Image: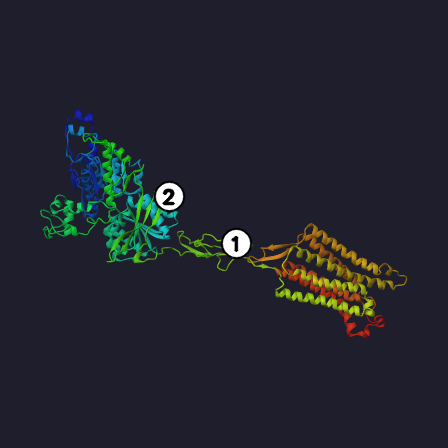
């Protein structure tokens, strides 16, 4: 089949002049199945048959002629007839190529590369078997055809386009969609009226994404069409976040074992949506295999090669299939042209003969072959009664692409040989002239379709979304339910026009996901070793939320908020402080009020018996001041309850510090008075005059003023302030009083502790002084309790969380206050109330055995 090419490249004018010889082809040329003479010949090539008879060459004998096998493809035959119709229509027009007749040579490629290449040479060289010097030299600059329409498959088209491109012979395909054909460096003379798969792949990916399918299967033809188309789709699908469970390839000439393996993969898959980027012949074989053992219901997504092919409507398992096809059209007069075929005309072409015999199951006269043994056709056959892809003109989609391609070539010829009034048939047209004119073509067909090519030889990509729906009679039919227009702004290319009927006639969109959507409150975690669409739904951690479906990450709530129980919303954190309504606050308040009441009650008792010996013997003035200080100590604990504020934080610590210093100062004064009193009984001692009532008041005032000064410095430099503590508890806020200056706080406590220790030491030294009622003993006990409480308070204060920190501080205040009032005043009150006989100076001055502490 390469002899023709060798002949063309070997013949040069100089050679012809010096070697006036004739050359003969070794084999018979490839004759067209349909042909008609004209001023200019347009070639056509279609996949009338889908198989070739191939024999293994032994390289010792001449190979046999290439031959097609299998049945006639009625749809491809309709394409060839549409080209005939377009040329007949052009020849009868007066506005396009007036006075010029177009002819055609239409060939069968058998859907195979070898035959397509052989036809390409035949269309370039012609069908002459002998070349002599005069003819070969005169034809050396031209080809047998002006341009050609075809082929249907991408792989044969690529082989032809590479050869024809070398000679600049234009090729306009109606069905070759491989995006690779847009490469003008490899295919400089290639054009097409059907959009590139680049757009179809993007449209299919957007379709899958639009309906929420993230887990799909993919099957393709193991050819340039399928492999390139699927590669474009998978790339677009990945960008859309779609995962592919499997991607299988099959070609109709591969072993049956490969077909069975692909079918079993489909049957076992968990994906309920399958994208099929298959040529019609491959799809037919795959569906026939699947019908033998049907898989679970699948939602088929089809490419344009089979989604609008009427032959596949017999496969009910594909009901609900959706896919993109070229827009449906109407070609006036085509149906009548197709139905004009008669038995006599059928005998003129082996294609028509085979079509007639197969359609009516009869044998035409003088015909032998596959119909041997069948009844003889008697003329009663009615072609109008046929219902097959040849006669079906309700879905003229790819047929319209043939129609447009033929008209595009006619317009290119018109631009090359015609002016405004007439055309010159004597002009010797070269393929390059037609090639340049095709680049400029821009016209509108009479059925309303625009024809033009961009710089890559592609048209504007416009698709209809086709859905296979059941009709009232139960048969499947094609229904247009949407459109995709690549010329529209990004994001607006896809539109729906009516409802889709899904697999099995369902109205609900089928679900095909590897993992169910993660609800709000969870995040997606990809399963190890699986695609990103296979994931587990992990609940958000405490304090985190996800308020959208299929969240990749959980978001942290703001510091003052916390996640709700279902982790989809942030709620304000509860603010915790020792409120007045808290049971613990009520108990502490009761003890505080009770303590203040006890202090006032003791003061009342002391005032009523202020002239009694026991009251007068215990320095009544300091006792009343101590009782007043104790009442303030009990009441200052109330400032620790309630919501902390700026003033309450400053008040609680300063009031506590000052009242307790006042209290300890009074106790310290009483202790010093006891020591001074017994020191004054010694002969020659005159110490009491140095520590009389004025000095006692002054000492209490000085000790208290020192604490007041410390508190003023604390409040001036860095006072306590309310603070929201987010660290201690994650789920709630602790509203507490920050110390401001820790030095100030510990200075206040340290000063109280210093006075308490001093008081304890002095009272301890005076515990054994002779007296029936030695107050130093009780002061020692009270200071021991006081120091024990506040030493224990320090670790408890730092280890108690939240509101219990305040409760511990209040408890320490109450405990130490009760310790003082009980140890110092309870024995006196007991004697005053229950032992009045002991409330005498004689009894107090009596000599009794001292008891050791």
Vertical relation: 695 (above or below) 334 = below
Q: Confirm whether residue 151 shows in the render.
A: no
Residue lying at 29% horizontally and 44% vertically, measured from the top left: 225
Give the residue pinned by disc 1.
Answer: 557
User: Quarter of the image holding residue 471?
Assistant: bottom left
Quadrant containing the N terminus in the rendered view = top left
Q: CA distance from mark 1 to mark 2?
A: 39 Å
Q: Position of residue 690 (x, y in %)?
A: 86, 58
Residue lying at 70% horizontally and 63% vertically, measured from the top left: 635
Report the side of 709 relative to 63 (left or right): right
Callout 2: SS: loop
In the image, which disc is placed on residue 489? 2
Question: Alpha-carbon neighbours of circle 2 within 10 Å: few (<14), some, or many (≥20)?
Answer: few
Callout 1: SS: loop
Query: Which of pointers 1 and 2 indicates the residue nearer the eye?
Result: 2
Quadrant containing the C terminus in the rendered view = bottom right
Q: Position of residue 12 (x, y in %)?
A: 20, 28
- Judge by depth and name the residue closer to the eye, 633 or 335: 335
- Judge by depth and name the residue closer to the eye, 405 or 332: 332
Q: Position of residue 526 (x, y in %)?
A: 43, 53
- Judge by depth and name the residue closer to the eye, 280 or 340: 340
Report the side of 21 relative to 836 (left or right): left
Counting residues from the start of the chain, the first of labels 1 and 2 encountered is: 2
């Amino acid at each position: 089949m390469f002899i023709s090419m060798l002949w063309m490249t070997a013949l040069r004018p100089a050679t012809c002049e010096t070697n006036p010889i004739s050359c003969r082809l070794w084999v018979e040329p490839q004759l067209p199945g349909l042909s008609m003479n004209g001023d200019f010949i347009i070639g056509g090539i279609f996949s009338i048959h889908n198989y070739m008879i191939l024999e293994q060459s032994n390289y010792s004998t001449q190979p046999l002629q290439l031959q097609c096998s299998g049945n006639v493809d009625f749809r491809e035959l309709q394409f060839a007839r549409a080209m005939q119709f377009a040329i007949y229509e052009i020849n009868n027009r007066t506005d396009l190529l007036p006075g010029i007749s177009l002819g055609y040579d239409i060939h069968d490629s058998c859907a195979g590369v070898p035959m397509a290449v052989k036809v390409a040479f035949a269309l370039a060289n012609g069908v002459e078997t002998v070349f002599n010097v005069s003819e070969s030299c005169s034809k050396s600059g031209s080809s047998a055809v002006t341009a050609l329409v075809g082929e249907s498959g991408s792989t044969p088209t690529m082989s032809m386009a590479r050869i024809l491109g070398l000679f600049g012979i234009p090729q306009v395909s109606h069905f070759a969609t491989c995006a690779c054909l847009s490469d003008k460096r490899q295919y400089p003379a290639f054009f097409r009226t059907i959009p590139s798969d680049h757009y179809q792949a993007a449209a299919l990916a957007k379709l899958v994404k639009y309906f929420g399918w993230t887990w799909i299967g993919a099957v393709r033809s193991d050819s340039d069409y399928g492999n390139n188309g699927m590669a474009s789709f998978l790339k677009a699908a990945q960008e859309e976040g779609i995962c592919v469970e499997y991607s299988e390839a099959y070609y109709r000439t591969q072993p049956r074992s490969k077909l069975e393996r692909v079918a079993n993969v489909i049957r076992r898959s968990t994906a309920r949506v399958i994208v099929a980027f298959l040529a019609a012949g491959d799809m037919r074989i795959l569906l026939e295999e699947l019908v033998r053992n049907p898989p679970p219901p699948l939602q088929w997504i089809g490419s344009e090669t089979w989604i609008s092919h009427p032959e596949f409507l017999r496969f009910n398992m594909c009901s609900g299939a959706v896919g993109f096809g070229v827009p449906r059209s109407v070609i006036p007069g085509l149906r009548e042209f197709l139905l004009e075929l008669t038995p006599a005309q059928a005998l003129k072409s082996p294609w028509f003969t085979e079509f007639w015999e197969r359609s009516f199951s009869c044998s035409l006269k003088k015909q032998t072959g596959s119909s041997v043994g069948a009844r003889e056709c008697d003329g009663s056959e009615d072609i109008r009664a046929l219902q097959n892809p040849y006669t079906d003109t309700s879905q003229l989609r790819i047929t319209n692409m043939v129609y447009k391609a033929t008209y595009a070539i006619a317009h290119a010829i018109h631009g090359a040989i015609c002016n405004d009034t007439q055309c010159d048939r004597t002009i010797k047209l070269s393929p390059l002239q037609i090639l340049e004119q095709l680049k400029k073509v821009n016209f509108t067909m009479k059925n309303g379709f625009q024809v033009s090519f961009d710089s890559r030889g592609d048209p504007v990509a416009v698709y209809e979304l086709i859905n296979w729906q059941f009709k009232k009679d139960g048969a499947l039919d094609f229904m247009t339910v949407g459109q995709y227009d690549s010329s529209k702004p990004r994001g607006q290319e896809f539109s729906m026009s009516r409802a889709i009927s899904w697999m099995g006639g369902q109205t609900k969109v089928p679900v095909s996901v590897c993992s169910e959507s993660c609800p709000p409150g969870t995040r997606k975690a990809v399963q190890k070793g699986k695609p990103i669409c296979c994931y587990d739904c992990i609940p958000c951690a405490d304090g985190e939320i996800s308020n959208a479906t299929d969240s990749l990450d959980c978001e942290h709530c703001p510091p003052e908020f916390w996640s709700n129980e279902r982790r989809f919303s942030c709620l304000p954190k509860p603010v915790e402080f020792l409120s007045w309504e808290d049971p613990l606050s009520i108990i502490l308040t009761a003890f505080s009020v009770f303590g203040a009441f006890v202090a006032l009650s003791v003061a009342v008792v002391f005032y009523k018996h202020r002239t009694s010996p026991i009251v007068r013997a215990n320095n009544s003035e300091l006792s009343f001041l101590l009782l007043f200080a104790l009442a303030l100590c009990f009441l200052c604990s109330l400032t620790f309850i309630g919501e902390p504020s700026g003033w309450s934080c400053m008040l609680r610590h300063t009031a506590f510090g000052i009242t307790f210093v006042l209290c300890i100062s009074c106790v310290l004064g009483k202790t010093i008075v006891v020591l001074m009193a017994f020191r004054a009984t010694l002969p020659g001692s005159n110490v009491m005059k140095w520590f009389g009532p004025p000095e006692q008041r002054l000492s209490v005032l000085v000790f208290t003023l020192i604490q007041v000064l410390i508190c003023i410095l604390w409040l001036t430099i860095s006072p306590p302030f309310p603070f929201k503590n987010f660290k201690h508890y994650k789920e709630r806020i602790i509203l507490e009083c920050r110390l401001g200056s820790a030095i100030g706080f510990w200075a206040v406590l340290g000063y109280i502790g210093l006075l308490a220790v001093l008081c304890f030491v002095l009272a301890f030294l005076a515990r054994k002084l002779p007296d029936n009622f030695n107050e130093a003993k009780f002061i020692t006990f009270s200071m021991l309790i006081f120091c024990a409480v506040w030493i224990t308070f320090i670790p408890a204060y730092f280890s108690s969380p939240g509101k219990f920190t305040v409760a511990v501080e209040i408890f320490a205040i109450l405990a130490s206050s009760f310790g003082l009032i009980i140890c110092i005043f309870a024995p006196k009150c007991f004697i005053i109330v229950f032992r009045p006989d002991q409330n005498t100076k004689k009894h107090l001055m009596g000599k009794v055995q001292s008891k050791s502490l």
